[in-house]
Image (cartoon, rainbow, N blue to C red):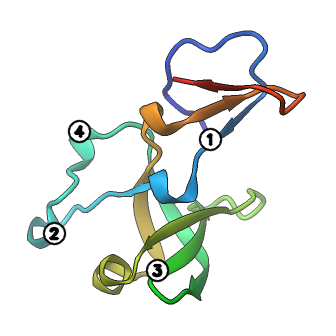
Amino acid sequence: MELTTEPILSEITHVGIRMNNIVPVFTSRSTDINPAADLDNVFISSVTSVMENPFSFVINVRPVNKEEADSIGWETKKELWNLISSDHVSISLPKENLLLLNDSDKEIYYV
């Protein structure tokens, strides 16, 4: 998976994002809240599992047709997931929310 971000320092070895910083991308006119043209790092993802919490859902997703890829967790409000629930969802990993990490896990570089 290729991501768009600010210039990356040579020490960066991993990229992370907080589960609640992942943004759903809506393509139908009835739910045109986050048009894809305005977002970075948009991916069509397969839903691998859904876990219900009292006020949210945690949805594990991975890029579509990438069965060998690890899933990432995305936390969203119940109302939103009930609106867009599907086997495939488009998500954005906004570059301003990416965490740039190094091997030592001692430093996090914010973009």
Instruction: Check residue 19 in the rendering and tell me which mark sits there, or answer none.
Output: none
Amino acid on which the number 2 mark rests in the picture? Thr
Q: Tag 4: residue type? A: Asp
- In the picture, measured across the screen, residue 63 lies left or right of residue 15, that is left
Q: Earlier in the sequence, mark 1 or mark 2?
A: 1
At label 2, counting other C-alpha atoms closer than 10 Å, the crowd grade (few under 14, some 14-19, many 20 or more) is few
Taking the spot 44% from the left edge, 39% from the top edge, the residue there is 41
| Residue, disc 4 | 38
Tag 2 secondary structure: helix
Q: Position of residue 79 (x, y in %)?
A: 30, 83
Residue sitting at x 50%, y 24%:
5
Q: Is residue 3 above or below residue 74?
A: above
Instruction: Give the amino acid at mark 1.
Output: Met
Cα distance in 3D space between marks 3 and 1: 27 Å
Of marks 2 and 3, the one in the foreground = 3
Q: Amino acid at mark 3?
A: Ser
Tell me the residue at 49%/59% (across/down): 20
**Residue that badge 1 annotates:** 1
The reply to whether dot 2 and dot 3 touch (C-beta < 8 Å) is no
